[in-house]
Image (tube, rainbow, N blue to C red):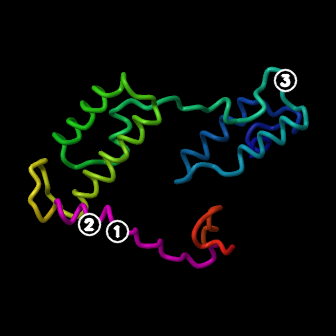
Amino acid sequence: MIIAAKGGTLTDITVGDVLQLLDAEADTFAGPPRHVPVFYQLLHTLGLFDDHAPTRLRELRTPGQRTPDELIDRYQLSCQPVRDLLVDYLRERQPALDYNSLKDLSYYLGKRFWKDLELHHPGIESLRLPPEATSAWRQRLLSKPKPLPRIPGRRPPSPSRGSATASA
């Protein structure tokens, strides 16, 4: 694609060209590009980049840490006052937590707690939860999630090491 768009030969491809391809694919497709990192590493292994080029594409594209706003906004909460409260709470806790703990806390508060309540109790706009909403939420936390539907042509995920499904 790079050669077709810019001309030249394989040896003329630069790190910047690969980054432009990555940006174009990200703008065009819904998911992240899957083959560009392999393509980058192949070009690097062939010695087509200068000595200052990182070995892996990941080294060029690290997004950094997200702010409390960004961590909560991933879950697209409908209730703005609760969203703001969760962001304020994360900001308050941020100095005392490492980033992974802050990210986990945002997941549990934003997705597992409030987004779950919004999905199962549309229109909910207060932390003063009715008792039936509270008990239903607790029950959902305690129950095992339903398996994802099988998509034709796609392999099911392999069981992880040490899982109960693996035979001894």
Look at mark 1 in the image and give the residue it sits on.
143
In this view, the residue in front, 4 or 89, is: 89
Residue 106: x %, y % from top left: 35, 41
**Residue 36, disc:** none
Task: List x then y, in percent, for residue 52.
Answer: 80, 20
Q: Residue at x 63, y 49 (%)?
A: 33
Mark 3 closeness class: few <14, some 14–19, many ≥20 residues within 10 Å:
few
Say few, some or many: other residues with alpha carbon within 10 Å of mark 2 (under 14 / 14 to 19 / 20 or more). few
Task: State whether residue 49 is above or below residue 32.
Answer: above
Stretch in magenta:
134-155
Type of the residue with mark 3: Asp
The residue carrying mark 2 is 139
Q: CA distance from mark 1 to mark 3?
A: 54 Å
On the image, which quarter does residue 118 sit in? bottom left
Q: How many marks?
A: 3
Q: Position of residue 86 (x, y in %)?
A: 25, 38
Does residue 155 sit above or below 4 in this rendering?
Answer: below
* Labelled disc at residue 50: 3
Residue 49 appears in which quarter of the rendering? top right
Residue 50, above or below 11: above
Q: Earlier in the sequence, mark 1 or mark 3?
A: 3
Residue at image x 40%, y 28%? 97
Residue in view at x 41 percent, y 72 percent: 146
Callout 1–callout 2 Cβ contact below 8 Å: yes
**Mark 1 or 3: the one toward you:** 1
Q: Quadrant of residue 138?
A: bottom left
Q: Is residue 6 left or right of residue 30?
A: right
- Residue 136 covered by magenta stretch: yes
